[in-house]
Image (tube, rainbow, N blue to C red):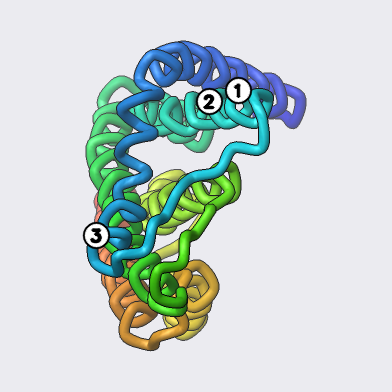
Amino acid sequence: MPLLEHLLELRKRFVLIALGLVVGAIAGWLLYDPLLVLLQRPLVVAEEMRGNEMTLNFAGPMAALDLKIKSSLFLAVFLTCPWWLYQVWAFITPGLNSNEKKYAYGFVGAAFPLFLGGAYMAWLVFPHAIEILSGFLPDDATAFTNAQEYLSLVMRLLIAFGLAFLSPVLLVGLNFAGLLSGKALLGGWRWAILVAFTFAAVITPTPDALTMILVALPICVLYFGAVGVSVLHDRSVEKRLAEAEI
């Protein structure tokens, strides 16, 4: 495709993603109250374990409205995950024929649970972080936690982990599009491990090494899974080309 057509295709996909997020945000607005209860759960658990009162603090009515809008958009990212994942794939591989379009459904089918799986891992890590950090509170102290900062941290953490678990599927997509070879992925395994552990060290709220390792290991496993799929795909393509020449 010429550059202009690529830009038009990119604009088209952005518009479709934005429309999907708008629809998801409307649903997120309606689901705000149960979402708020769920996101406060780590504080409730820490409060029960420590005995310290831990309360979300809103600076004012505008802060509450701002947080509701952000939470609605956050929930929209999860509700419309299959939709925007498909748009990403459709932009990467716009020239697929009808037989090859089955890969698009496979891509979304693999990416959706991985994205949710990454978010779920973040959800498992976060209460542990709150428990450790609340341990520094003096006895009988009350922690007034800024609602915007707390919920923004939770939302960023869930989305960051989701995207991290999604990255191997995107690498496979680039391989199927002919933009990245399995050999190149295999050759960069050292950098991939370094990036995985650096990401885990930066994104995990606690300084303990065990949490960092538990976060980095699944990402490394997913990366090598992407390498294996890409290498097998490259061999299949080479075999088809060799047969075509004969």
Vertical placement of residue 240 versus 85, above or below? below
Q: What distance separates the C-alpha of mark 1 from that of mark 2?
A: 5 Å
Calculate the distance from the C-alpha at mark 1 to the C-alpha at mark 3. 29 Å
- Left or right? Give the position of 188 relative to 51: right
Return the x and y of residue 84 as percentages of the image width and height. 45, 28
Above or below, 83 relative to 193: above
The numbered dot on residue 48 is 3
User: Residue 128's x, y, as percent?
Assistant: 31, 69
| Residue in the picture at 47% in, 70% down | 205
Rendered residue at 36%/63% (across/down): 52
Q: Amino acid at mark 3?
A: Glu
Say few, some or many: other residues with alpha carbon within 10 Å of mark 2 (under 14 / 14 to 19 / 20 or more).
some
Query: From mark 3 to mark 2, how far is it between C-alphas?
Result: 26 Å
N-terminal of the two: label 1 or label 3?
A: 3
Q: Amino acid at mark 2?
A: Lys
Verify CB contact (< 8 Å) between mark 1 and mark 2. yes
* Residue 42 rendering spot, x and y as whole percentages: 32, 54
The disc placed on residue 65 is: 1
Tag 3–tag 2 contact (CB < 8 Å): no
Residue 221 in sight: yes
- Residue most toward the right? 4
Going 31% across and 85% down the picture, which residue do you hit? Answer: 210
Task: Work out which quarter of the rendered image holds the N terminus and state it.
Answer: top right
**In the rendered structure, which disc, 3 or 2, sits on the residue that comes first in sequence?**
3
Residue 245 rendering spot, x and y as whole percentages: 33, 50
> In the image, which disc is placed on residue 68?
2
**Residue 193 badge:** none
